[in-house]
Image: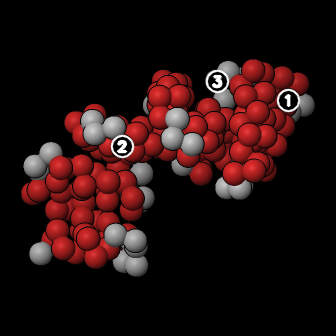
Amino acid sequence: FVGGILREVARAAAVLTADPQAALAARYFLEGSRLDDGDERHLDEAAAAYRRALIVDPDLVPAIVNLANIRYSRDELIEAQALYERAVGLDPECFEAHFNLGNIQHDLGRFDRALGCYREAVALNPGYPDAHFYLAVTLEKLGYSQEARPHWKTYQELAPKGEWVELAREFLE
């Protein structure tokens, strides 16, 4: 997902001289990214910068995703979901949006919907351990233990010191 964001920033930077609107959107996005440092005290400012970027360029997927991430971190699930869905509509290969849509559906107990999101996330980024972990968890919750097994194994392989490696090991025993 970082690669996608960097591609978008590079795209914006490439048109800086040719398109002043794109330059302005890129400037606001980069300002938001600078402020979006995980410190709760800066998140309102970061969100405002992302919104300014979206006023200038409503299709700037990285700004949409980052604004959605802020909403999600504040447990504003409906708002975050709408933003992630917008990002997927603009960029169907946006891994982070699919993955976080899965997280929201999972948080809401909508495991069948989460399953589709996680499957898409794994297809888009098979090297991301947490996508395999949450896909395995969701499959287990839906009673598909056999289908979950390869994802538990992949999680262990990709994150041998990961937060949930012991849980994955238990499910594989």
What's the residue type where badge 3 is placed? Answer: Asp
Q: Quadrant of residue 134?
A: bottom left
> Percent from the top left, x then y, of residue 74?
57, 42
Query: Mark 2 = which residue?
Result: 107
Instruction: Please give left or right for residue 173 compared with residue 126 in the image.
Output: left
Q: Judging from the image, what secondary structure is the residue with disc 1 in?
A: helix
Asked if the residues shown at circle 3 and circle 1 are in contact, with their CB atoms under 8 angstroms apart, the answer is no
**Is 61 on the left or on the right of 103, as rendered?**
right
Neighbour tally class for label 2: few under 14, some 14-19, many 20 plus, Cα within 10 Å: few
Mark 3 and mark 1: span between their CA atoms? 14 Å
Residue depth check, mark 2 versus mark 1: number of the one nearer the observer:
2
Q: Position of residue 52 (x, y in %)?
A: 78, 27
The residue drawn where x is 28% and y is 51% is 135
Mark 3 or mark 1: which comes first in sequence? 1
| Tag of residue 24 | 1
Task: Identify the residue at image location x=15%, y=45%.
Answer: 142
Spatial distance from mark 2 to mark 1, Cα to Cα?
36 Å
**Real-space CA distance between mark 3 and mark 2, rounded to the nearest whole angstrom:** 27 Å
Q: Which residue shows up at 45% across the image and 43% down it?
A: 100
Above or below residue 151? Residue 86 is above
Q: Which residue is mark 3?
A: 59
The amino acid type, in three-letter code, at marker 1 is Leu
Q: How is the image coloured?
A: secondary structure
Identify the amino acid type marked 2.
Asp
Whether label 3 touches label 2, CB < 8 Å:
no
Which element carries disc 3, helix, strand or loop?
loop
In which image quadrant can residue 60 be found?
Answer: top right
